[in-house]
Image: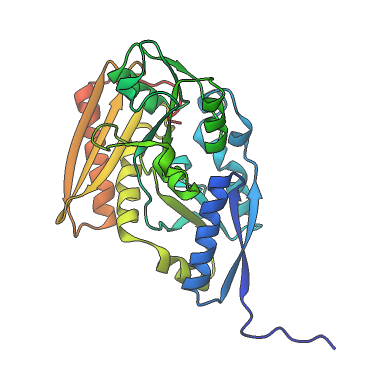
Amino acid sequence: MTEKKSASAPRTVRLGTRGSPLALAQAHQIAASLKQASAGALEAEIVTFTTTGDKLTSERLVNSGGKGLFTRELDESLSEGSLDLAVHSLKDVPSLLPPGQVFAAFPEREDPRDGFVSRTAKSLRDLPQGARLGTASLRREAQALALRPDLQVITFRGNVQTRLRKLEEGQADATFLAMAGLSRLGYADLAAPIPVTDMLPAAAQGIIGVVIRDDAGDDLRAALAKINVTKSEAAATAERAFLTMLDGSCRTPIAAHLFDEGDTWRLTGEVLSPAGDRRWAATGTAPKAASMAQLAQLGRDVASEIRAGAKGNLPVFGDER
């Protein structure tokens, strides 16, 4: 006789993630939060993927299809039903989710700043004339060249450990890494954080996005709702709306950040030329009580102001990574 499963046994949900150390750290964070939020009723089984984007180690993503290459395999598995949820670094997620998929949670945002990493210099300004800067991010490249047009930029791809190894091997004199990733991996002390006011980060940098199908069970939805952080959701909403309005394919050096100023939200966004010699920026505000729809409109309004100021001259070149 088959023994019946105990009614108190947890339900297993399949959580999809990329297989890099950083992605796995984020996935384990969500799995633990999910178990706690559901009072043990949900147990996450982590399923790892090597995405198309992970396989590209020497060229910019735009040459092969853009940032969606980091989510494609997970998107397909979630849509097909072989996953129940997917966990992403939100800045890697395209502006539009596949049909039938929705965001279910944005946990506490980690440090949104960029970090400067070098074996010989303490800051970008300290690098010698003509130094080699390793990055595959057009935003970081343009922002760096705006300050140091003499730098030689070389393409630097790979996960955090790979880029640190390349730096140690002397392939470049310096690089940038997101402080969020370094902090989650316990490497924060390797970098000098750059103030957000000096180097505006990528839209949604430091935010984890949890995606489910729109037909997901009520128990999963309810548990994820408990780990959602309103401040993170507000930032994700405004910054991604800004990005979508300006350049949904992320083929422009572009940055945005939502600042919490007490009773007010302030969104600052900017677009740069690839060489960093031109910059278009705008700022807008919304009351702290603003709805997510109003914050999305704030993002669109700031983007529209930049478009108007540029008078059709915004650059389109490469990808934001």
Residue 222 appears at what percent x and percent y?
Answer: 45, 71
Quadrant location of the N terminus? bottom right
Residue located at (25% from left, 32% from top): 198
In the image, residue 294 above or below residue 40: above
Residue 314 appears at what percent x and percent y?
Answer: 30, 22
Residue located at (55% from left, 76% from top): 40
In the rendered structure, the answer to whether residue 25 lies left or right of residue 5 reads: left
In the rendered structure, the answer to whether residue 299 lies left or right of residue 50 reads: left
In the image, residue 191 above or below residue 166: below
In the foreground, 302 or 146: 146
In the foreground, 249 or 187: 187
Residue 309: image quadrant is: top left
**Residue 213 in view (yes/no):** no
Residue located at (25% from left, 28% from top): 307
Residue 301 appears at what percent x and percent y?
Answer: 22, 40
Q: How many marks?
A: 0
